[in-house]
Image: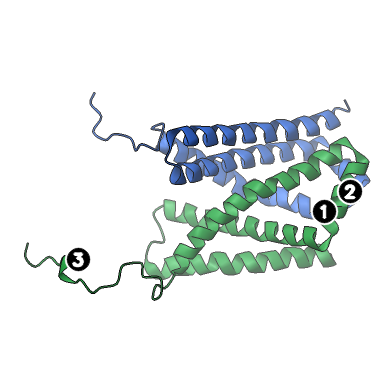
Amino acid sequence: MQRAVTPPRNRPDRRGAHHAWRMHLSTWILLILAPLGLGLFVWLAGKPHSVVIDALERPYVALPLAFILFISVWHMALGMRTIIEDYIRRPATLMLLLGLNTVFAVAVVVVVVWSLVQRMLGL
Amino acid sequence: MADVPRASNKPNRPLSPHLQVYQPLINMVMSIFHRITGVGLYVGSLLLVVWLVSATLDRDLFERINGLLGTWFGQLVLLGFTWAYLHHLLGGVRHLIWDSGAGFDLPTVKMLSWGTLVLSVLGTAGIWLLAAYV
């Protein structure tokens, strides 16, 4: 089938609707859960190490926190993708920055989840 | 089509947006703030990650980072992070309302935009007062 509209040059894919749905989903999840995450940080901010680690080692804190951070990073990567696509026109730079955005997101999730899980399991 | 006004008929009109007479609209400013706070939170998330990961790794490292966050500069950054967080959250609610198709008449647009700014400042003050005195 002939496509009526050619995609803009700075959009490497045709997944705008998919992007919008994922943004909506992550926004709704964060709207419900992110205040809990912020509340935890406000509560733990400035507390000594023993108090912080005592809270973070509990599975009912660590697991929801890891989930909130995962959704946050997902949301962040989606938002940064839009910003990059808005401002960058050179295809090579565009692909590079989108790649770095993904690498950053995956790295943050891996490091955070690993650090919480290894502590929770007492590795 | 002779009655359609064309730009070339009015050569003396200033270019738009003419920066000396241009009035920024609150919804536009809040839209820009939404993007800026989004980028700020993207970068600022590294702070929380460093704090969190250091807590799980090494006590001394954690206490040193905790000390840095306790300085006036660290507190300023955390204050800014709190405001950016609330502003972006409220902006997100505004976008969800608009995405549902509601709230597009101008008074509502203006009210939602000012509401984002006012509530984010009040909320930040509230959280910090709560953290300081409770």
**Residue B5, picture quadrant:** bottom left
Residue B7, numbered circle = 3
Secondary-structure class at tag 2: helix
Relative placement, left or right, of A43 versus B105 is right
Secondary-structure class at tag 1: loop
Separation of residues labelled 1 and 2 (CA atoms):
13 Å
Residue ID for mark 2 = B64
Q: Which amino acid does label 2 sit on?
A: Arg
Q: Are marks 1 and 2 on the same chain?
A: no
Residue B124, numbered circle = none
Q: Disc 3 sits on a residue from what chain?
A: B
Residue ID for mark 1 = A45
Q: Are marks 3 and 1 in contact (CB under 8 Å)?
A: no
Relative placement, left or right, of B52 versus A33 is right
Q: Chain A is drawn in which colour?
A: blue
Q: Do labels 3 and 1 share a chain?
A: no
In this figure, what is the number of numbered marks? 3
Q: At 65% from the left edge and 47% from the top edge, which residue is drawn?
A: B43
Residue A35 x/y as whole percent: 68, 52
